[in-house]
Amino acid sequence: MNIERLKREIARNFGTPAVVVDLDIVERNIARVQAMCDAAGIGNRPHIKTHKSPVLAAMQRDAGASGITCQKLGEAEVMADGGLDDIFISYNLLGEEKIARLARLLRRARVSVAADNPVVVEGLGRLEADRPLDVLVECDTGRKRAGVETPGEAIALARDIASRPGLRFAGFMIYPPEDAIAATQAFLDEATQGVRAAGLEVRVVSNGGTPNLANLGKIRGVTEHRAGTCIFNDRMMMACGAARLEDCALTVHATVVSRAASDRGILDSGSKTLTSDRPPDLDGYGMILEYPQARIAKFSEEHGFLDLSASNRRPEIGEVVRVIPNHVCVVSNMVDRFVTVRGDEIVGELPVAARGKLT
Amino acid sequence: MNIERLKREIARNFGTPAVVVDLDIVERNIARVQAMCDAAGIGNRPHIKTHKSPVLAAMQRDAGASGITCQKLGEAEVMADGGLDDIFISYNLLGEEKIARLARLLRRARVSVAADNPVVVEGLGRLEADRPLDVLVECDTGRKRAGVETPGEAIALARDIASRPGLRFAGFMIYPPEDAIAATQAFLDEATQGVRAAGLEVRVVSNGGTPNLANLGKIRGVTEHRAGTCIFNDRMMMACGAARLEDCALTVHATVVSRAASDRGILDSGSKTLTSDRPPDLDGYGMILEYPQARIAKFSEEHGFLDLSASNRRPEIGEVVRVIPNHVCVVSNMVDRFVTVRGDEIVGELPVAARGKLT
């Protein structure tokens, strides 16, 4: 591979920073995750928050995904525009503006949603749609984010959903910590038993997260998996063992624009490109492929502060380097387009069509 | 003021999260900073990185600003499209793609740039433009970001610039820590003396930063000031004493979408809206005006984790709250449009036209 030539061509055609996606790696990642789900007999419903592109979502569908997951209604609208169907919105939708949009979306795509409280269910119940809306009860089995905290609440909410015309109880949505298999199983078993006793069917149990792909098949009753990051991967996924370096499909090409002292330098990529996301277990704000010992120590919006003290080799001003972000999903959201490549050849550009959909 | 009515109207018309800018406060902030610069006899060259809007830049110009500052060429292009002139790009521009764009931009707007090293100067020297390009030498007087580290280097770079046809040495750009007045003065005095001895004139000394507005007039020789954040202000500016709560023009309207336990809740705004920026001296990821004792403890992309344990009053599901971000400049960059208001009346929407200009 002639990566130096590729870097020069990208800098010349697009400038830096450039957010570059290798479609060969993307295809391998899509195929690997689909094969994992197939082997476990579990549906694959990739979360599009990582790529925000209907084109990449269609690649996931064509590889065998049973549907897709969105976090925001605005993302689902873009995906429907792009021809995607069977969209699960894994988020509490609240407020008349969202309910009106959801009703419009339901006229042109199959959509299901999550809910974790009666206020959301009551709002969904006011939906005026031609077909019933499938609602999953979001259950919290340890992450302490959204989701009902007890099987009793899950059962009550399921009955609430089922009691409303226009809504159908579809099942449960979980997003457990990776080490909470036993607690999650106990929660699901009790909740499932309870809703069955109430005469309801649990058609879907949706698990999520790229790290949880390692637990595929370990929780009885799970019917599908929502993983996002695995299409691109990042430093966080490498740190938790969910990806190898060669599975990372997205890099930020950045230029060293200043070297005011021998042990430091400035990259033209700061928090406006790579974001300030830094989990406590990661040192610095990204990994530089060409200088793995260089530390991205700090960010301004347009400055990446390089600490080169531990690196024997040091980049020169004007040199382009490739950075693996800490967290790739938030980087996609910073750009209108990806530069796409296959190996060392430029393919073109791909719009991040669902970028910045706040609502 | 009927803020509750305003919040309902914004939620109904735009949904949440909504990034809301109060133009009354914006106008007061613009006028205050202009008056401070006028009183100090220093030119006002606001940094547009905070608002990224040619409309707001024109308001700053019409209030008396002598020009504007951009960090990126792409921002300068959008500002020129919007009729702004006299644009300083305070950044090392490198690479043939940028030099070609800079040449095109120079045909339609007055532009000056910064440089801190000979590689950048050499590249700028290859510019084929009709008029000479003013170049400021970026000097580092303590921040350890970009900028030459010694007066000797500043003098040498000034001479390098002046020696190249098509380039003119314009002066110095500084961005000192707020407590580095003496060191900055000594650096500037020596550098100024040196370039004068070489027969060059220092026409511009450009200082920057909203916190440094408190030092206006304290550094001899400074001719202009570049402040960005002061048009909107944020939690960081309140923490350092540069702004009061009533000076904060931008709030994020967010809905409480989950309250799974009595001491916690979930906002529909996470790092995709408010960003992960959190300076070490600030606790949490924003200040909730309605519940100042509630802590935004953690973010996922679309979830703000509320820790309500210290708050006696607690929001209900469906309630809309207003959040002052930690760092407002990065929030502007997350949205395509601001919702604009004056007091408790909606004005409309304003495109963030220079959002996401990475290059």
Image (cartoon, coloured by chain):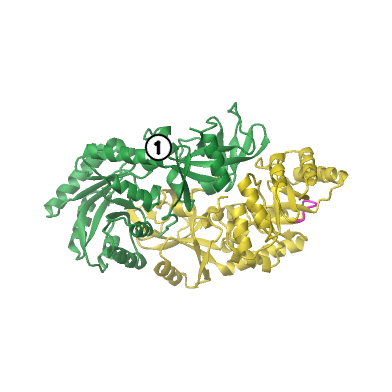
Chain colours: A green, B yellow
- Asked if residue A115 can be seen in this view, the reply is no
Residue linked to disc 1? A237
Label 1 marks a residue whose chain is: A
- The foreground one among A128 and B161 is B161
- The foreground one among A242 and A191 is A242
Tell me the quarter of the image containing the C terminus of chain A. Answer: bottom left
- Asked if residue B335 can be seen in this view, the reply is yes
Tally the marks.
1
* Residue B28 found in image quarter: bottom right
Left or right: where A353 falls relative to A116: right
**Magenta residue span:** B219-223
* Residue B36 found in image quarter: bottom right
- Residue A168 on image: x %, y %: 20, 59
At x 68%, y 52%, the residue is B208
Kind of residue indicated by mark 1: Met
Classify mark 1: residues with Cα within 10 Å, few (<14), some (14-19) or many (20+): many
- Residue A149 on image: x %, y %: 28, 49
At x 44%, y 62%, the residue is B321
- Residue B81 on image: x %, y %: 61, 63
Magenta-span inclusion, residue A126:
no
* Residue A157 found in image quarter: bottom left
